[in-house]
Image (tube, rainbow, N blue to C red):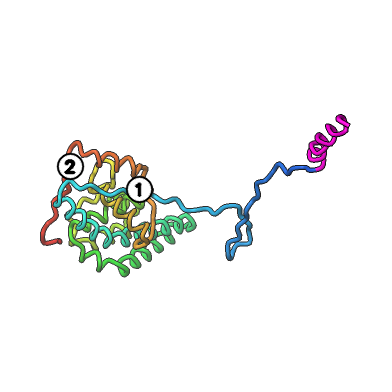
Amino acid sequence: MKIFLSFLLLFPCFVWSQVYETNQDSIQDTYIIIEGDSIVRKSIDLDEVMILNKINFVDKKEHIQYLILRRKTLKVYPYAKMASDRLQELNLRLEMLGKNRAKKRYTKQVQKYLEDEFSAELKKMTRTEGQILVKLIHRQTGKTTFDLIKDLRSGWRAFWFNSTASIFDISLKEEFDPMTSKEDYFIEDILERNFQNQRLERQNSVLDFDFYEAEKKWRKRLITVPLQPVNPSEK
């Protein structure tokens, strides 16, 4: 009897251990269907977002200069983007045209288009706005305005020398460099913030610089480098 009872006590263990099989893979994949897309996905690709820190201005004067710079940058950026887009289109078109005569004719057409589109607006710009425009063109194209004139000659030469007569005292060789110019770092910060809030249409710089490295440098403030003074009449 004792042997029989012992067998009954042990029997459930044998039963439970032999009858049930456990599914070892308990992870279930979740699939996502995006409206308008026929591809089933396991994840959603998100655009890279740049985290922008709050700027610690040296003083109130620098903060005011930043606000003035922001207003001017927002004003001239669309023209720099337009110039970059037209330059890219021009280069692609010229590669397709075989004869020099056809290239010259097309270049003149682009020149006339640019003059009609925003030359009148350029004449209304102040000196500082014109200088920001020159910097932004370098940011967008990788070439200074001076080099663009030299490379493209006729059409662009006429455009830049004639249409920008009122701001011709600016430096056409000016480059955009946030690592060495605090003003350029501020301009890039202004652009990035307005790209994110979609006030400006994004156009990434073709220049090789690290925004966070520039931010790190200027946040240290080991040496205070003031912005260029703004003419009160331009505010």
Closest to the observer, 203 or 171: 203
Question: Where in the figure is residue 9, as x and y percent of width and height?
Answer: 81, 35
Q: CA distance from mark 2 to mark 1?
A: 25 Å
Position of residue 143 in the picture relative to residue 47 (left or right): left
Identify the residue at the far front of this view: 1
- Quarter holding the C terminus is bottom left
Q: Residue 230, how many percent across, how many down?
A: 14, 55
**Considering only order in the chain, which callout, 1 or 2, is on the residue closer to the N terminus?**
1
**What residue is disc 2 on?**
225
Q: Which residues are magenta?
A: 1-19
Are the two marked residues, 2 and 1, in contact with CB atoms closer than 8 angstroms? no
Main SS class of the magenta portion in the image:
helix
Q: Mark 2 belongs to which amino acid?
A: Val
Q: Which residue is mark 1?
A: 142
Across the whole image, how many numbered discs are drawn on residues? 2
- Tell which of 40 and 76 is nearer to you: 40
Question: Which amino acid type corresponds to the residue marked 1 in the rendered image?
Answer: Gly
Q: Which element carries disc 1, helix, strand or loop?
A: loop
* Quadrant in the picture for residue 212: top left
Q: Position of residue 158 (x, y in %)?
A: 28, 60
Residue drawn 57% across the image and 52% down it: 43
* Residue 231 vs residue 49, the one in the foreground: 49
Q: Image quarter for residue 164?
A: bottom left
Coordinates of residue 61 in the picture (x, y in percent):
14, 52
Above or below residue 178? Residue 79 is below
- Of marks 2 and 1, the one in the foreground: 2
Quarter containing the N terminus: top right
Where disc 2 sits, the SS reads loop
Residue 232 within the magenta-colored segment of the rendering: no
Side of 40 relative to 177 (left or right)? right
**Dot 1: within a 10 Å radius of its alpha carbon, few (fewer than 14), some, or many (20 or more) residues?**
some
